[in-house]
Image (cartoon, grey):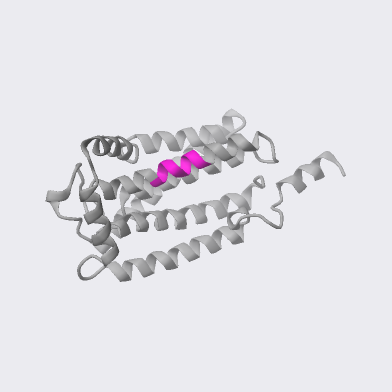
Amino acid sequence: MTEDASAVARARPGPGALPLRTPLGAVLVALLGLIALAALVLATRHGSPPALDRAGHDWSLRHRPPGLVTTARAITATGTGVFPYGTAVVAGLIAGRDTRRRLGYAAGALAFLLLAQGVRYVLMELIARPRPPLDDWATHASGFAFPSGHATTSALMAGLLLTALGLRTRGGTGPRPLRSVVATLVVCWAAAVGLSRVLLGVHWATDVLGGWLFATVWIGLGTALIRKALPLPQ
C-alpha cells in the first residue's frame, strides 16, 4: 500500500466510528437534535414552567452559598462577550497547518459562530419565553430565556475547539491520551457554563437544554460540511 493510500485509509471512519464521523451521520445528528428541540419548544412555550424547571430552580435557590455563586459568575462570564469570538478565532488558528489555512479556518469559525448567534436571536424573539422571577437572579441577564445564550455559545465553542483538534491531528497523528483529556475538559467546561445559568437563577433548566440542542443542530450541520470537504481522523 502506498503512503497516500495509507493516509486515506487512516482518515476513513472505522466500523465503530461515532455518528459525527461521516457527513450523513452528522446530518442525522442535526436532524435528531432539531426534532428534540422542536419537541422541547412545544412542551415549554405555553403555561407555567414544567415541574423539572421548577424543581431545578428551587433546588438552586437553596444550594448556592456565596462562594459557589462567585465561582458560577466567573464560569458564566466565559460564555459571553468577546471571549467566545476570540475562542472561535483561536480554534481556526489551531486547525490550520499553514498561514493560508489558519486564516481561512479562523474566518470560517467566526462566521459559523456569528451566523448561529443570529439564528438563535431570531428563535429567542419568536418564542419569547420569560425568565425566572427577577428577585431570584444572582447575576445580570437580559432578553428572553429560551434558548439560553450562554449554554448555546459555550456548546458551539466546544464544538469548534473539538473540530479544530480533529483537523489539526487528522490522519491519526498526535497523542490520543492528550486529545482525550483536552476534549473532556472542553465538554466539562461547556456543561459548567450552562449549569451555572440555572444555579444563578437566570434560566430554567429547559432553557439550557434548549441551548445545547440548538448547538447540536448547528454543530451537526457544520460538521457535515467539513466532513464532506475534508477527511478527519478516527
Question: Which of these two is toward me, 149 or 207?
Answer: 207
Left or right of residue 186: residue 128? left
Position of residue 112 measured from the top left corner of the image (x, y, whole percent): 45, 46
* Camera-side residue of 177 and 147: 177
> Which of the 4 image quarters holds residue 129?
bottom left
| Residue pictured at 47% horizontal, 32% vertical | 90
Give the residue at the far top of this rendering: 99
- Residue 91 visible to the viewer: yes
Residue at 20% in and 56% down: 131
Q: Which residue range is magenta in the image? A: 184-191
Q: Residue at x 28, y 50 (%)?
A: 198
- Residue 187 lies in magenta, yes or no? yes
Q: Position of residue 63 (x, y in %)?
A: 24, 47
Magenta region, main secondary structure: helix
Q: Residue furthest right?
A: 1
Q: In this orientation, which residue lies closer to the viewer: 138 or 169? A: 138
Give the answer, above or below, for where 202 lies relative to 161. Answer: below
* Lateral position of residue 52 relative to residue 10, left or right: left
| Residue 108 in view | no
